[in-house]
Amino acid sequence: MYPNQKEDAKLWMEFLDGNQGALSRIYLANINDLYAFGCKFSVDRSLIKDCIQDLFITLLQTHTKLSPTDNVKAYLFTSLKRKIIRETIRSSRFEQVMERGDYRFEVGFEKLDTQAFEHDNYSKKTLAVRSAIESLTSRQKEALYLRFYFGLSHKEIAEVLHLEVQSSRSLINRAVKKIRNVMRSDKKRISNFLYFLLAQTS
Amino acid sequence: MNKYKLYSSTDFLNDDSFVEWLLKSDHDAEMFWDTFVEEHPEKKNEIEEAVEIYNHFKFTSEDLTLEEVFAIWNNVKHKSVEKRFSFLTVLKYAAVFVLVFTTGALSYYLYNNATEETEFTIAENKPLNFNEAQIILSDGKSVPLNSKESEIKYDATGEQVIIDNDTIRQAKKEAEPTINRVVIPYGKSSQVTLSDGTQVWLNAGSQLVYPSVFKERQREVLLIGEAYFNVAHNAKVPFVVRTEHADIEVLGTSFDVLAYPDDKMFQTILVTGSVSIETKSKGLLSGKNKMVLEPNQMFYLDKESGVNYVNNVDVATYTSWKEGMFDCDKLDLSRVVRRLERYYNKQIHIKDPLIGTYKISGKLDLKGDISEVLDVIQSFVPIDWGKQQNGDYFIVKPY
């Protein structure tokens, strides 16, 4: 459960009952997360803004046909993602043959402290782990991002990924194990190196 | 708790309540996991590894500016009442987009934790020129503010506005709140007295949005830029200043708020009384943060990293701008120059980054011409300054 989930669900009910103001509060509570999430799918910032705008217009226009949900954020994420992917394909100049459901997802990492960079084993390890994360599939990256950045539950992630809860759970599990193994092997290499240093000095 | 006994690091990361703890770390969760590690020391390594894996997921996040947030919502409100046409294609043309945004009614929605929602609606008849000092009344009429330091005063009913000795009346509608807005470009400043008697000094390059008369149980304004507030005391109705990055709530007090969109930081400096500041969550990670200031304290927030702190300051340094003075205490020249640029609405280029780090202490009198101020600075630190052909100023190292 994400923070604000209950408030969102309550506002969603009010919105379905015809209170448009409730949607404006859902908008304000979620706009930054929606934008942050959207930015991972495309570098075209104005496209993302247009899609967010279009998403809320659709909600206002179709509110009588919407159904209740206790998972407003997952619902918004799912709809936004669908719009962005559709628009990206539509606006791409070349007739790219994109597989259904195929898309790019770039996580984007915080900058490392460059001063510590050269000497620090931690930074080296971080780089190894980061490149491992980047080598994951888009869906795996997206799932991990939703999980560790927004704290979405398995159920919510499954909804955004369009998967059964069990498959989304094992997709995440496989990815996390992969990262753990990279982290562990790097740890071993470092301790070997330390051992080597000790052997030299004694 | 039993199921966790067999968990590996990856199992922990697969557990919803474990991840919730990592993200939010509230008191109960903290207690639960502390106790768990205490009772099962053999799990400590697995948990530490789980935390280490999680710590690698530090992702970048981008934010929209407050104005973008409003602009998108405005478009939503407008477009949703029209027949849907291929609206995404229309928006590809920026000019059309700007036109849609600047004409018609502009609504400010402010998110409110309380049950009541505030909607600030301003009818706009023509595109807004942000380079012109003006006050926009509830009917959409805009009145230019001609003097360099304008004065605006509301009576208690909010129907009568005195602008630099001219009196203007605006009709009040029963149903909607009458929302006014003051826009002050760089190079000007203004003093506004609100209907409750609260005085607001608006610094250059700032905007203030407020109801001409406050509701019985709510006093709220929206600020972009910098303002000094002298809030009329009313123990029953707190006064709230909303900004892009934080909300400031007070009962009756004086304080300065610095919330320019193009600055890296947000600041609030308390002169008298007490204020509480609630920073807005960035993503879901950091959550909300509430802080109480005492007199002579400054709250500082680095917008990018979210890092914030409170320290003791000499308040005069931060508030003397409203008397046309600029008081600096070991301030980087680059910061001083940024202020002068806003105050005089001129560009000043520092040609050598090293010069920008010179520390300036002292009082600058801003009532005079910009060249007088630059001369004074020159007597503090080793610089030369000059004027370019295009009217911009530059600062260089002396030869």
Image: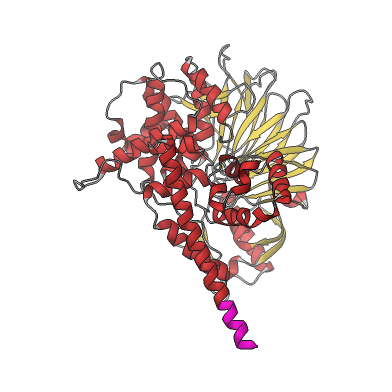
Toward the viewer: B274 or A60? Answer: A60
Quadrant where the C terminus of chain B sits is bottom right
Decide if residue B122 is on the left or right side of residue B192: left
Residue that lies at the very extreme toward the left in this rendered image: A95
User: Is A197 contained in the magenta span?
Assistant: yes
Give the residue displayed 49% in from the left and 29% down from the top: A71
Residue that lies at the very extreme toward the top in this rendered image: B174
Count of numbered tags: 0
Toward the viewer: B77 or B198? Answer: B77
Instruction: State which region is magenta.
Output: A193-202
Give the residue displayed 34% in from the left and 49% down from the top: A104
Q: Position of residue B376 (x, y in %)?
A: 67, 63
Q: Position of residue A49 (x, y in %)?
A: 40, 39
Q: Position of residue B79 (x, y in %)?
A: 37, 25
Quadrant where the N terminus of chain B sits is top right
Q: Position of residue B308 (x, y in %)?
A: 67, 50
Chief SS of the magenta region = helix
Residue A196 appearing in the image: yes
User: Is B77 contained in the magenta span?
Assistant: no
Residue A40 appearing in the image: no
Give the residue displayed 63% in from the left and 43% down from the top: B21
Q: Toward which corner of the image does residue B110 lie, by quadrant?
A: top right
Toward the viewer: B292 or A202? Answer: A202
How is this picture coloured? secondary structure
Q: Is residue B310 above or below residue B84?
A: below
Decide if residue A124 is on the left or right side of residue B78: right
Decide if residue B364 is on the left or right side of residue B63: right
Q: Is residue B397 above or below residue B183?
A: below
